[in-house]
Amino acid sequence: MERYNLPIVIQKDEDWYYAYCPELQGCYTQGETYEEALSNLKDAMALHIQHLLAQGETVPQPEILNIATLEVAV
């Protein structure tokens, strides 16, 4: 079994947690809790990667170097 270590992003608004993997275009999900969003994303990523491999494609290598916040005064 091959293992992949890819960056993810989880954001929260007033009601939900939204999670996605920038390296897997279109791979995103949501959950009512952080843990649910993380679990859902893990499942979505596994399915996405299985589909890529079944199509003879390669799994993208991580390109994100840093994720940070930036304060901007307006």
Image: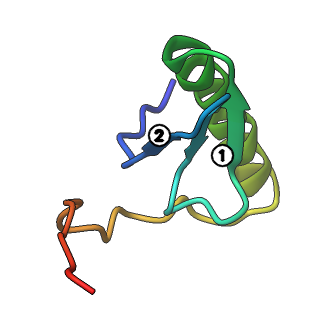
Percent x, y of residue 65: 19, 68
Please determine whether, in this image, residue 51 is positioned above or below residue 19.
Answer: below
Give the structural element (helix, strand or loop) at label 1: helix
Residue 68 appears left or right of 61: left
Toward the viewer: 2 or 71? 71
Percent x, y of residue 5: 35, 40
- Name the residue furthest bottom: 74
The quadrant of the image that shows the C terminus is bottom left
Amino acid type of the residue that numbered disc 1 sits on in the rendered structure: Ile
**Could you tell me how many numbered marks the image carries?**
2
Give the structural element (helix, strand or loop) at label 2: strand
Residue at the spot x=50%, y=63% of the render? Answer: 23
Could you classify mark 1 by the number of other residues whose Cα lies within 10 Å: few (under 14), some (14-19), or many (20 or more)? some
Q: Which residue is tagged 2?
A: 10
- Name the residue furthest front: 74
Q: Quadrant of residue 26?
A: bottom right
Please determine whether, in this image, residue 3 is positioned above or below residue 71.
Answer: above
Q: CA distance from mark 2 to mark 1?
A: 19 Å
Residue at the spot x=23%, y=60% of the render? Answer: 67
Percent x, y of residue 55: 81, 60
Residue 44 appears left or right of 24: right
Q: Which residue is tagged 1?
A: 49
Toward the viewer: 32 or 56? 32
